[in-house]
Structures are given as structure tokens and as C-alpha cells.
Image (cartoon, rainbow, N blue to C red):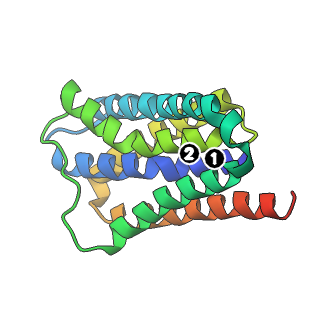
Amino acid sequence: MIEILLIAVSLALDAFAVSVSSGISVPGFGWKQAVKMGLYFGVFQAAMPLIGWFLGSSLSGYITAVDHWIAFGLLALIGGRMVWGTLKDGAEEEVPADLSAGRLMMLAVATSIDALAVGVSMAFMKVDIAVAAAVIGLVAFVLSVVGGLAGRRLGNLFHQKAELVGGLVLIGIGLKILVEHLMGG
């Protein structure tokens, strides 16, 4: 269960960063906006692993001999992309001037794409996907609400460090899966 929680936190860090930025930049941001943003992010973060799991499960019979490599590869790719994003020079994520439903939907999809790939990798692990999806969605909701409210007070100090830590955690979990399989555990 600790692995699911770590994955959930890692996946929610993009949503957290966008929420912090929104809390800073959206005029009148408060509890109502934070909960609204948290609901969008939480629902999408919960739905994407389920979709990915169903996709991965439908293919699992064909690729069980290499499933540990697929899980490792997907988690390392996602984590590596997160780490790379913090190290490269570039513009910060664009944050909407308002929190319309359309903009929140686009942000929710953009911040939950990684959860789809993690869901695919979970099809090759011994995971209760319903519990995992619920934990991922709940963590995304909580971190989004907290991030939005913290953004009102703290500024945009955490974005890069949070994404770096999240990427490293995903890479570490991928390595753990690979090593456990290769060692016969």
C-alpha cells in the first residue's frame, strides 16, 4: 500500500504545482476554487489509471514474459520526463487566468496523462486497481486543494522541487519492480 501512496503523491505533484500556480495567479482564488480544481484533478487522476489498467490487462496475456520491463520502462519514462522537466531551461507551465470548466478540463487531462501510463504498468503488478485508483484520486484532490490554498500564501516556490522529487520516486518504484522480479521476489 505504501507503493500506491507514493505513486499517488508522485502523480499528484503536477496537479499540486498547477494548483499552487493557480492560487497565485487567479484573482479571488479561495476555498470554492480550490475544491473545484481538486474535484477535476481528483476525478481525472482516478479515472486514468483505470483506463490504463484495462488497456494493459487486455494485452497482458501476450506480454507476461516482459511485464516487469514494461512496468519499469513506463515508470522510468514518466519519472525521467518529470526530472528532465525540472532540469531543462524553459518556460513555466501556463496557468489559466480563470477557472472555467473548459480550462479546468484541459488542465486535468494534461496533469493526468502520466496516470494513464501508470495504470498500464499496474496491469502487470499485483494491485487492486479500484483501491489504487481511489487512493490516486483522493491524493490528487487533497494535494490540489492544499496546493491552491498554499499558492495564495506561499508563492511559486515548490514547483520544480516537487516535480523533481516525484520523478525520482517513480523511477525508484520502477527500479524496485524490476529488481524484485529479476531477483525472483
Residue 45: x and y in percent read 46, 35
Amino acid marked by disc 2: Ala
The residue under label 1 is 5
Vertical comparison of 161 with 174: above or below: below
The residue sitting at 48% across, 28% down in the picture is 47
Vertical comparison of 171 with 48: above or below: below
CB atoms at circles 1 and 2 under 8 Å apart?
Answer: yes
Residue 34: x and y in percent read 33, 36
Closer to the camera in the image, 6 or 23 = 6
The residue sitting at 38% across, 45% down in the picture is 15
Q: Where on the picture, by quarter, is residue 157?
A: bottom left
Q: Residues within 10 Å of mark 2 (few under 14, many from 20)?
A: many
Confirm whether residue 104 shows in the render: yes
The quadrant of the picture occupied by the N terminus is: top right
Residue 62: x and y in percent read 67, 37
Q: Where on the picture, by quarter, is residue 164?
A: bottom left
Q: Which mark is residue 20?
A: none
Vertical comparison of 121 with 50: above or below: below
**Residue lying at the far right of the rendered structure:** 184
Amino acid marked by disc 1: Leu
Q: Is residue 33 left or right of residue 15?
A: left
The residue sitting at 63% across, 46% down in the picture is 5
Residue 76: x and y in percent read 54, 61
Closer to the camera in the image, 21 or 70 = 70
Confirm whether residue 149 shows in the render: no
The quadrant of the picture occupied by the C terminus is: bottom right
The residue under label 2 is 8
Q: Where on the picture, by quarter, is residue 73?
A: bottom right
Q: Residues within 10 Å of mark 1 (few under 14, many from 20)?
A: some
